[in-house]
Structure formats: structure tokens, C-alpha cells
Amino acid sequence: MNEFVQVFPENWQKNYENKGFITPSLIQQAVFQPLSNKQSIVAISPTGSGKTLAYLWPLLLNVEPGEASALVIFASSQELAIQVADVAREWGKDKELKVQSLVGGANVKRQIEGLKKKPEILIGTPGRILELMKAKKIKAHQVKTMVFDEADQLFDAGNSQIIDQILHQAPTEYQLAFFSATADRSLESIEKITGKTFETIDVTAEDDSRKGLRHYFLRVPIRKKDEYLRRLTHIEDFQGLIFFNQLTELGVMEEKLLYRGVPVGSLASDQNKLLRKAALEQFKKKKISALLTTDVAARGLDITGLPYVVNAEVPLSEEAYLHRSGRTGRMGNEGTVITLVQDNNLRDLKRLLRPTNITLEEIFLHGGKLQTDQPIKEDVATAANNKYKKSFPGKEQNPEHNKNKSRKKVKNKSKKERNKGARRK
């Protein structure tokens, strides 16, 4: 067994093996000791490289049963908070640790009842956690460690003032851990809010957990975007998240695809919690092949084995592209990212990805399949011609049509001869 796992409790070691884990990811190895030693850090690694377990393993080992509110984890969305809470429960149960999720949109009275059981681990969205801290339902002085998952997105979401208030509620001595997929803006925001600099552990350059991920662009006429998305969903074994920059664009496209009979759902930030949960469950159970979403709604989503991510339009930032692509090809698995472009915005996509090491390749949708070789024009013409003949049978496909046509010619010829004879008389 890997040396990394030797410090795990026996039940954790069994769980590690049962899940098929072989070698911990770079970020998991890099942060384990610093977090175990209660050191405050900023950790940077690609989306999908195993950051959640990277902080949960050492921090759960540091928490003892009965230490109420010892570990507080902040997530950038309700879905991410619930996912992290599920993972924390799975690994925390062997230590008899209680986990409470605290997200906006959920019943606050029920959450307060749960807090009366003094859970050691609190996981939620910043707004709801601050609300409960101010109401003295969470005893801020008991907090020993705070984790900010997807820190770059937390700050982008306009939570800076909320996080600042949370930090002022906390005790003078506590451990801080910030996990992010991007460095520049995250480090700047963290330093601005905390007034401190922390050790930064960045494994981006060495990390190969995304080696199975491929990035493509697909040229699509702007007026035929719905048709191309429909065709994409009909690819064999297609299951994908389709991203939009604006909710209005998402809504329009959802209507068009549903009208065409395409089995799609949507995950939008203006939906209530139950609708979002229902759409996500349908998608995970593969009852629908595509889930239309936005950057805000899809933060931190972890859908096991997701094969495709489609950008229906060029993302607005490098960070948005990286977070979207992070939904597929996770932990060394294969994944495909396709961005729909027109000639006038292809250069925008290339400019966006210039600072990254991403290799972008053109892909074509032909005959119900994706291919990197450009279809031969003759093949395209032949396919179109065959489709036309199938719809409107000609002489090769319809002998009866030819027979009737011949009879008509004979009949017309006889009529002409009779007329000719009449004129002679």
C-alpha cells in the first residue's frame, strides 16, 4: 500500500482500496503534511485534480469527536457544498464525526435544529454561514480551521465583503486553507481580504491529472447553433454539460432543443433548490443526455465519468474556460471539451487560451460522428445527394415512376401524330 495511506485509520485504508485509488494526486501529497501540522496555506491545482480529498483527509484526522464547529468549509455554490458534505460524511463516519450542510435556499430552522447536535464539521455557502454566526447559532470562537474551496470563484461571486465579516467573527488564532484552480487573481484577493501572505503550494506545472483531456473547436453557423447542438446530443454515448455565458441564451436554447425533442435539462442560478436537484439527478441517472448550465450554476460540480463539456459560446475568461473544462477528464480519465465558434470569434478563443498550455484542435461533425479529419467535399455532396434521392426517389429508385413516364411519352406522341394527320386532311 502507498506510504501516503499508512497514516490513515484502518477503515480509511479499506475505503481507499475499495474506491480503486492507487496513487494520491500531486496536490493530495503536497498539502497533507502542512495541513496536518495546522499550517495556513494557499493551494493551487487544476480543476479535477482531487482537491476536495486533499484537504478533507488531513483536516478530518485533526478533528476530534465533540469539538463542535471545529472545521468550517466554504463552497461557492449549493451543489458544491452538498457534494463536499457527502464526501466528508463518508470519510468522517469512521471517526464518529457529524457533518452539517448549511446552504442558502434551504430551511434555516431545520439547519438550526441540526446545529443543536453540535456537529464538528460545517460545510456551506458564505452567506448562510455568516447569517448563523451573527445569530450566535454557530459559535465562531470554537472554529479552529476554515477552508475556502474554489476560492477564485468564491471571490468572483461577490462574496468578498461576506468573507471579510466571517474572518472578523472568527477567533484570533485559527488555520486557513484556500484551494483554487487559478493563482493570480486568487492570491491577490486572499491577500487583500486577510491582510496576510500564506505559503503557496502550486502543482499546476507538474500535475498530469488532466492528461486525458482533449480540447477542440467546432465551426458552427450562428443561426444553426441549435441544429449542431441537437446533432451533438445524438452522438453515440453522448452525455455533456453545455455552458452558456448568459441565462437568457440558455433559456432560448433550451426551448429550441425541447421543441426538437432533444432530452435536455437545465441548471440555472435562478431556479429553486428542488428544480436544480431534480435536473442534476436526471442527468446523473442519464435520463437526459445534456444539461444546459452557466458558470455560476455549475460551480464545483463533480459528475463521475462525464465524457463531454460543450461551450455553446466562447467563455468570457480563462478562469471560466478552465473551470468548465474541469468537469470532464478528472483524475486522469479521458474527457472532451468542444467550443462552438464562428470565424469572427475563433481568434478570441485562441487569445483566451494563450497563457495556458492547452492545445486546441479543430474537430468536425460529420455523419453523426466527431472527427479531426476534414470531410472531403465530394463525400459531403454525395451524402447530401443520397439524402435527396432517398426523400425524392428518381428513376434509379422507382421503376414504376419510369414506367408511368414512358406511357406518358407514348401517349403524348400518339396525340401529336393524330393532330398532324388532322392538319393534312
Image (tube, rainbow, N blue to C red):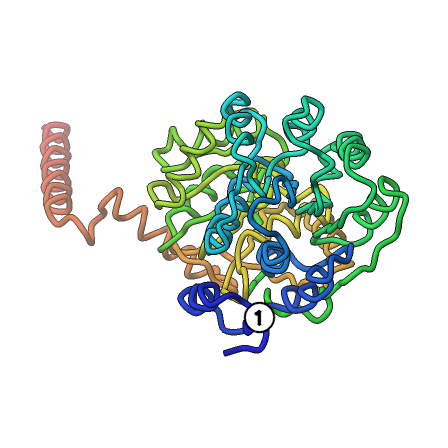
Q: Amino acid at mark 1?
A: Val
Quadrant assignment, res 366: bottom left
Q: Residue at x 54, y 36 (%)?
A: 101
Q: Residue at x 52, y 64 (%)?
A: 372
SS class, disc 1: helix
Q: Where residue 391 appears, x then y in whole percent?
A: 26, 43
Q: State the residue in front, 116 or 35.
A: 116
Q: Residue at x 32, y 46 (%)?
A: 388
Q: Which residue is mark 1?
A: 7
Q: Where residue 1 appears, x then y in whole percent?
A: 50, 78
Circle 1 crowding by C-alpha within 10 Å: few under 14, some 14–19, many from 20: few
Image position of 61 with respect to 266: above or below: below
Q: State the residue in front, 225 or 321.
A: 321
Quadrant assignment, res 296: top right
Image position of 53 with respect to 278: above or below: below
Q: Where residue 363 appears, x then y in whole percent?
A: 54, 59
